[in-house]
Amino acid sequence: MLIADYISAREYIIYYDLYKYIFAGYTGELQTEDTKYLLDGENIQVTRTKKTRKLVEKIKDMLNDMKDGRSSVSPYDTAWVALIKDINGSDRPQFPSCLEWIIENQHSDGSWGEQFVFCIYDRLLNTLACVVALTTWNTTPEKRNKGVLFIKENICKLERGNVENMTCGFEIVFPALLDKAQHLDIDIPYNAPVLKNICARRDMKLKRIPKDVVHTIPTTLLFSLEGFCDLDWKRLLKLQMQDGSFLTSIASTAFAFMETNDLNCLRYLQRVVKKYNGGAPHSYPVDMQARLWAIDRLQRLGISYYFEEEFKDMLDHVQRYWNQDIGIFSGRNSNFCDIDDTCMAIRLLRLYGYDVNPDVLNKFKDGDKFFCLMGETDKSPTAMYNLYRCSQVSFPGEKILEDANKFTHNFLQHCLSNNQSLDKWLIAKDIPGEIQYALEVPWYASLPRVEARSYLEQYGGANDIWIGKTLHRMPDISNNVYLEAAKLDYNKCQSQHQFEWTIIQEWFTQCNFQHFGISKKELLEDYFLGATSIFEVERSRERLAWAKSLIMCKMITSYFTQEKPTTSTKNSNETRQMLLNNLLKFLHQLSEETYETLGKDIHLQLHSAWGTWLMCVGEEKTACQIEAELLVRTINLCGGHMVDDEIISSTDYKNISKVTNKVCFKLQNRKVSGCINCKENHNEVELEMKEVVKLVLDSSSCGINKDMKNTFLAVAKSFYYIAHVTEELLNFHISKVLFEPLEYDS
C-alpha cells in the first residue's frame, strides 16, 4: 500500500486492521454492545398535526386551481369598464355589474382603493375614476358627492407622497381622468398647484416619447393607453394581444373598445367581468407571475417539499409560454416582457431541471446596466434583487449572468447603504432584510433551513401589497395560509432536530470522541450542517448519517495525524480498539436502520465507500480531497439510493464526484488557512461551484437519480457555507435554526 511509506510499521498494522474490517466487510461481533437509536420511519412517528395537513391540502387546492392567477379588484379599472355604453344603443352601461360594484364598495371616508394601506396616489386615482363613472351615469349622488369631498380634502397630500410608491403611470392616467372630470363639471380644484404640476409632468413626459414608438413596438405605454389622445388605432390594434387585451390592462382595453368598438376587446372585457363577479382587476391574466412567485414564496418558506407535483405542473405551464427571444410577462402570450418575471422564470426553471437559456437577459441590458422595463426612470430594488438571485444560479461561461451579478450586487449594496429600499412594485414587510440576507449569505452558502428561518420573519403574508396602476393584492403569492403552514412545519421539524440533538450527544459521550480531541461544539456544528440541509422529519437517518460521518472522519484523521510513536502500546491499543468499535458500530447501525425501514441492504456498498476513503487516510491531503464524496455516498445510501458500481463508474458520476471533491477540498483549506479573501482561490472556487451546479441541474445528465445529484450540491453548499460565514454568524444561525422556536398564534 502507498500508505506504508508514510506511517510507521506499528501504525501500518493499525491501519490494516481498520482496512480489513471496513473494506473487506467484516461482520463479526463487536467488543462492546451495539446500542441503536432508530430515529426515523416507523420507529419514531412525529405525527403531522391535523391543522398542518389541512393547511397543506388547502395550499394544494390553491395551486391546482390557479388557472389565470388571482388579483384583487381594482376600482379604477372597474370604473373604466363601467364607462362603456351599451353596444345596442340604449342609454345604459354595457356592464351594469361594474357600476353596482362601485356603488357597493365605497369606503366610509368616501374613497375607493386599498382599504388597509393608505397610498394617496392609489386612493385619489381610484376615487376620481369612480366619481367619474357615477357622474357619467347620474347615479347615487350621495356617494358621488362624498367621493368629491374626499378628493378635495386630500388632494394636497400629493405633495407629500412617496415617489417610490407612486402607482404606475400615475402622471399619465390621472391627468386624463381630470380632463374627463372637468368635462362632466365635477367640482374639483383643477387649478390647485399640485394638479398643475402633475399635468406639467405629463406633458413633459409625453413630449419625450416619440409618437411613432407608441404605435410601432410593444412598450409599457400600452398599459396606459387611456392616458393618451389622438392615437392611430388602426396601427395600435396590430399590437393587441391574442386574448384581445392591450398588455393585459383592463382600463387600457376598455378605453380601446370605446375608441374602436373592437369585438376582441369586448370579449376580453366580458370574460374578465364575469370571472370577477362584476368587478375588474388591474391586470388579467397574471398566470405567469402567480405561478412563479407562489413557487418562490413556498420554496423560501421551507415547505416546497410538500408540493413537488404541483410545482411540476406549474413550471410546465411557464415553460409552455416561455419565449426565448424576449422572455415573459406577468400574463402569458405577451408581446412585451419584463426582467422581473423573466429572471424569476430562468431561476426557477433551471433549479427544477428545465432547459433555459439566460441570454434573453441581454434584452434588458444597456451598457453595463440592467433595467426592468425599457425607458424606466427609477429602478426597482425587488426586481434587481430577483435578478441578483437569478444571476447566482449560473453555469460556467454565462457572461450575461456574470454581468448581472456584478451590477445587481453593487446596486443592492447602494440601496442598503443609502436606505433606498422603497420599491415601486411591492410594499412588503421587510425588503431591506431580504436584500441584506441575500448579500450576506450568497446562494452557494444559503442552506435551506437558514434561508427559511430568515424568510419566515420577513414574509408579510396577506399584508403584502403589489403596486400597479392601483394597489392590489395577489392571494396566490401573498397569503397567511402559506405563512401559517410554514411556521407549523418549521416548529415541527425543529422539535425533531432538538430531539435528535439530545440523542446524538449521548452517542458522542458513549463513543468518547473527546478522547480524540473532538469537542461538543464541533458536534453541534456538524449536526447543524446536516439538519439545516436535510431538515424534513422523515429524513432523520440521512441527517444523522451526515453529522456522524463528519465526526467519524475527524476521529480517524485525528488519530492517524496525531498518534505518536512514543505513545504507550497499551494506550495505543485501547485507542485503536475504541476507534475501531466506534466506526464499526456506526456503519452497522446505518446498515441495519436502512434495511429495517427501507428494506435495502446497503452494507457492502457502505463498507466499500468507507474502505475507499480509509485507504487514503494515511495521506491526509488525499483523504480530505475525497471526504465530500464519502459524505455524499453515505447520505445517499442511507436515503435508499443504491450507489452501485455501474453508477460509480459512469462518466457523469465521476465528473460530479471529481468537481465536488475538488471544490470542497479548496473550501476546507480556505477555512483552515484563512485565505478567504484570496482572489485566485476565490475565482477557482466560484468556477468550480458553477460546474457543480451545472452537473446537478443539467437534465441531460443520465443515469444519476435527481435526489442523488442534489446531495452533491447540498454537501458542496455546506462546505461553502462554513468557509464563508464568520464564527459569530455561524453561532447566530445555529441558535436561530435549532433552538429558537418561531412565535405562532395558535
Image: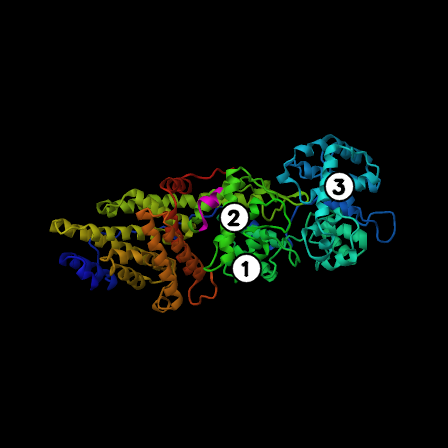
Check if mark 2's residue and mark 1's residue have beta carbons within 8 Å.
Answer: no
Q: Where the N terminus falls, by quadrant? A: bottom left
Residue 437 counted in the magenta span: yes
* Closest to the observer, 464 or 643: 464
Check if mark 3's residue and mark 2's residue have beta carbons within 8 Å.
Answer: no
Residue drawn at x 18%, y 53% as measured from the top left: 576
Quarter of the image where one finds residue 117: top right
Please tell me the numbered disc located at residue 359.
Answer: 1
Whichever of callouts 1 and 3 sits on the residue coming sooner in the sequence is: 3
Q: Is residue 268 above or below residue 143?
A: below
Q: Is residue 335 left or right of residue 554?
A: right
Range shown magenta: 436-443
Check if mark 1's residue and mark 3's residue have beta carbons within 8 Å.
Answer: no
Whichever of callouts 3 and 2 sits on the residue coming sooner in the sequence is: 3
Q: Is residue 284 left or right of residue 142?
A: left
Q: Can the viewer see residue 75 in this picture? A: no
The residue positioned farthest toward the right in the image shown: 90
Residue marked by disc 3:
175
Please tell me the numbered disc located at residue 408.
Answer: 2
**Label 3 neighbour load within 10 Å: few <14, some 14-19, many 20+:** many
